Image (tube, rainbow, N blue to C red):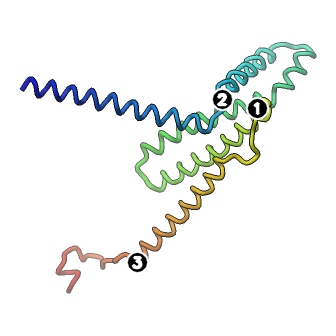
């Protein structure tokens, strides 16, 4: 009996550690695909800190420097808010029970993701990093929307072809007779 318990505990530990490695690999891989490089984030944080310090300074030099940084800092703040909202929506979609609400939340998430990708490209352009005018992720999202529309049309066809029972016909005899 003791050997069985020890074997069971060892198996649980092995499964738990392997499962965490798989989850970590998936999360890191997806984060790297569509996000700003770490150097850009550091640079943007420096700009934001500098802008926040210059708000309290009242001089013509500070005003001109703050005006130069204002556009990129506001875009970076928007970028951070979009990422925060995406994380909240991701959690809401996972815990939602209603399919209709899930679909709306998923649509909102995709719209936020599209906006995030576009903001990343604008920020890359402002920082002087290589950027693309039409990001690949937006093309992939368009393909995803096409596939979702196809799935919805197939669902409608399936519902129209399904067998409809008369109300109150819950037994086999009642349906056949």
Circle 3 sits on which residue? 161
CA distance separating discs 3 and 1: 54 Å
**Element type at mark 2:** loop
57 or 125, which lies in front?
125
Q: Which mark is residue 42?
A: none
**Picture coordinates of residue 139, whole percent (x, y):** 65, 52
**Element type at mark 3:** helix
Circle 2 sits on which residue? 37
Q: In front of the other: label 3 or label 2?
A: 2
Q: In the figure, 71 relative to 176: above or below? A: above
Q: Residue furthest bottom?
A: 177
Q: In the figure, 169 relative to 101: above or below? A: below
**Element type at mark 1:** loop
Q: Residue drawn 80% across and 18% down?
A: 55
Q: Are marks 3 and 1 in contact (CB under 8 Å)?
A: no
Circle 1 sits on which residue? 129
> Badge 2: few (under 14), some or many (20 or more) residues near its Cα, within 10 Å?
few
């Amino acid at each position: 009996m003791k050997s069985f318990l020890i074997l069971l505990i060892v198996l649980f530990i092995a499964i738990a550690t392997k499962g965490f490695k798989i989850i970590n690999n998936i999360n890191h891989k997806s984060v790297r695909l569509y996000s700003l490089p770490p150097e850009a984030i550091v640079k943007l944080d420096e700009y934001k800190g500098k802008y926040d310090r210059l708000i309290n300074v009242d001089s013509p030099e500070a005003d001109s420097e703050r005006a130069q940084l204002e556009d990129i800092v506001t875009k970076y703040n928007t970028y951070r808010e979009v990422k925060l909202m995406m994380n909240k929506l991701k959690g809401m979609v996972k815990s939602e029970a209603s399919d209709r609400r899930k679909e709306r939340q998923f649509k909102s998430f995709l719209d936020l993701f599209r906006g995030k990708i576009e903001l990343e490209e604008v920020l890359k352009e402002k920082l002087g990093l290589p950027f693309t005018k039409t990001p690949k992720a937006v093309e992939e999202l368009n393909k995803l929307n096409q596939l979702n529309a196809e799935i919805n049309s197939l669902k409608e066809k399936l519902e129209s072809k399904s067998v409809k029972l008369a109300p109150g016909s819950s037994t086999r005899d009642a349906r056949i007779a």
